[in-house]
Amino acid sequence: MTAEETRSILTIALMAAFADGLKDEGERAAVKRVAEALGPEAGFDLPGLYREVLLAKPDLGQVAASLQSQAAGRSADIPVAGMLALLAAEIGARAARIAHGLNGDLSASLIDGESTIGGGSAPGATLPTRLLRLTHARLSAAAVEQRLRGLDPPVIARIENDHVVIDMRTVMPHQDEMLGRLLAQANSSQTGPQ
């Protein structure tokens, strides 16, 4: 790992630690442990990085983009880096292909959305995305979501404004075809909750 990659990772960790506006000593100690685990040989000024994050308030998108560009060519080895690097336009193109492949009672449309970074570990940190919004002619959103979770493998979605949505940023590109097959399976299934 390069010194710049280590700096980017620590910047993101500090932004997450300070997102609540508190300067908790436990969070500082955890970030210090992360810095030590990443490699003490990097040898940069951790207190200086604290000041930079607190005062300059770096843009999370830019820090993530910097980390992504450093990991170019290695994103297959780092799934999260690949997910962070995806542009909303390319996510939308993938979602459109899946939506066009559906027919029957289950239909899909594309809507703009936000991907929460870190599953909520960095409150308020999001990236723009395109969501696959699913609607079933006869089933409620809760029933569709339950049907999706009952597939093998399960499809994890969420309900937003009474519709089931799938954030395509969380689906790796090589999984698109499988997701299309699973949605078709959910569409044709006559079992499960109504």
Image: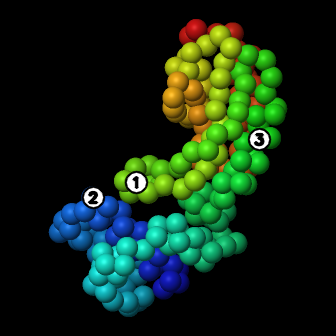
Tell me, yes or no, if residue 37 can be seen here.
no
| Residue at 57% over, 70% down | 65
- Say few, some or many: other residues with alpha carbon within 10 Å of mark 3 (under 14 / 14 to 19 / 20 or more): some
Q: Quadrant of the C terminus?
A: top right
Q: Is residue 68 above or below residue 190?
A: below
Q: Secondary structure at mark 3?
A: helix
Mark 2 sits on what residue? 20
The tag on residue 45 is: none
Tell me, yes or no, if residue 77 can be seen here.
yes
Q: Nearer the viewer, residue 118 or 40?
A: 118
Q: How many marks?
A: 3
Mark 1 sits on what residue? 124
> Residue 145 in the image: x percent, y percent?
56, 24
> Residue 52 in the image: x percent, y percent?
34, 81
> Residue 184 in the image: x percent, y percent?
75, 25
Mark 3 sits on what residue? 96
Distance from disc 2 to disc 3, alpha carbons, whole Å, reads: 37 Å
Give the residue type at disc 3: Ala
Q: Are marks 2 and 1 in contact (CB under 8 Å)?
A: no
First reached walking from the N terminus: tag 2 or tag 1: 2
| Residue at 76% over, 37% down | 98
